[in-house]
Image (cartoon, grey):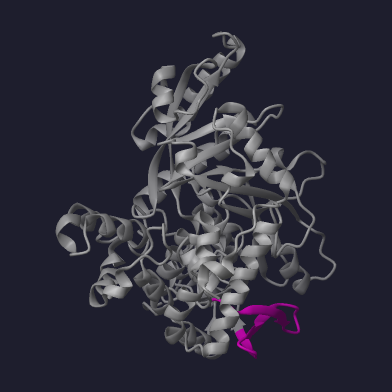
Amino acid sequence: MLPGAFDRSDALRRLADTRFDVVVVGGGITGVGCALDAASRGLRTALVERDDFASGTSSKSSKLVHGGLRYLQQGDIRLVYEALLERQRLRHNAPHLVKTLPFLIPIFGSRGVVNKKLARAMGSAMWMYDLTGGVRIGKLHKRISPREARAHFPVLPEERLLPSYLYYDARADDARLSLAVARTAALEFGAVVANRVEVSGLTKDDQDRVVAVEVEADGQTLTVRTDSVINATGVWADDIRALDDPTADATIRPAKGIHITVPWHRLRNDIAAVIPVPADKRSVFVVPWGDFSFVGTTDTDYDGPLDDPQCTPQDVQYLLDAVNGSTTAALTVDDVVATWAGLRPLVASASPGRTADLSRRHKVQRSPSGVVTITGGKLTTYREMAADTVDEVLEHVLEARVLERAQRHSRTRRLRLHGAAGYEELVEDADGVSPLGAEIVVHLADRHGGEARTVLAIAERDPDLARPLVDGLPYLRAEAVYAVRYEMARTLDDVLSRRTRARLLARDDSAAAAADVAALIAPELGWDAAETARQVERYRAAVADERRAPDLPEVALDAAVGA
């Protein structure tokens, strides 16, 4: 396919007018990965997302691109190997989004003595991680002294801390990674991609093969003709399977994971840390993120509404207890400035064990009607998951006439994502790029890659757009304008929760700025005064619900925005 546009109006027109080889349902990281893999092989590809790109699990992860030390403990060496290989590919393909991050594993003892069995096990695990693929990052793990460990994480308890471990993994803004994959599929390979498009039904021919997907968009019903369907909807996968076969058994066992955000000065960790949970066999991450640190995650069975998982007081206290059990920080609920909850789409198992013990491997299933469903997996391995899914479509669903013009093997192993081009040069020349200064240039480059020049141009033309979008956060007002013009942001929540991560870093400050941000993007989206007010009300109501769930302190938002 020829390069296309990332424009929703154009996408809706093309959905109605084009016959596709494959329609991908779901705009999380797995779905956009499938769309990119299919489109890059030459398939006529469409992707539809009911809400916004990465609005589900893919914006609510731990933001880590890693192999997973605990999977070694579970004996899943193959999963760790594959994940570390994919981590290396992501570092190459998206250098603007995926960054190397040192991790500290503090070792604690009693009266200066460590359990020898634990010490041997941890040393073996570190070497196994390096040998499995961790060394690809260019650095081996090492033992560091208690003083060195406390230099990285000053609130570790001096009297209990023993020589500890330092190793390396990577992190990424999950929502922006998903968006970059979607834009690559559309802009460079012609995929038709649209958010706010909900699947309402599947049309089949007299041989019970799916030939079209019925969707609802902007109050209209569209029939999208297609030869195959990929169901990449994560925890909602069984809903799409039910449209295909109402008798299909449930395959998803949702597991809820939550995170909390606290001001960085309360922990002062300049690298990430993996700390044990008292009286549990799990550990949690403490990850620095600018002026903040986030802590997570939990891993519990979930049977509530899939569209709105919430953080309970017990969830928040679990993470606070974990941090306080391994540090002197003495965090309380008053320190929590944001929370987020996501659902992992784990593949259901016949055994009733903990969700923490379920495999993160993925599973590809094909129905007789031609719907291919991808479930399970993790953020780091999305590209491999997508390749396996499209392989299934090509090998068992599409007809020979389509295969003649499609490439049989995935092309995404070394395919650079949109924004990667020009990133290194922009950062290297940051001092001379813009009158706004090197710090802003690097901030924008780390979020937009080479396309940061477009954001800079918007900000330089209007000094008002060079101001902060939300006080205390690094985002510019120009980024909100760019999000609407070029990134298919359609709501206030799209801008504050995913195009920027204001809601995850400073929920109450983002709610206080909601009216101002809505007024900024209203002309771009054609909102009248009533719609602008509705957007503010919805966003602030969602923030209030989020704050209310873990019983966090109330904030007088009306006074903050002068309402």
Main SS, magenta region, reads strand
Q: Is residue 551 visible?
A: yes
Query: If the image is split into quadrants, where does the C terminus sit?
Result: bottom right
Magenta segment boundaries in residue numbering: 195-224
Instruction: Decide which of 148, 3 is in the foreground and name it.
Output: 148
Q: Is residue 9 left or right of residue 259?
A: left
Residue 270 position by quadrant: top left
User: In the image, residue 306 lies at what x, y percent?
Assistant: 72, 62
Q: Return the x and y of residue 224 as percentages of the image width and height.
A: 60, 84
Depth check, front residue: 425 or 509: 509
Q: Residue furthest left?
A: 432
- 158 magenta-colored: no
Which of 181 and 225 lies nearest the eye of the viewer? 181
Left or right: 394 in relation to 319: left
Position of 233 with respect to 144 (left or right) is right
Residue at image position (53%, 20%) is 107
Residue found at x 53% / y 76%? 491
The answer, for residue 374, to whether it is visible in the render is: no
Q: Residue at x 40, y 50 (%)?
A: 98
Q: Position of residue 31 (x, y in %)?
A: 56, 64
Where is residue 389? Give x, y as percent: 58, 60
Q: Is residue 509 above or below residue 200?
A: above
Instruction: Check the picture and name the quadrant holding the N terminus.
Output: bottom left
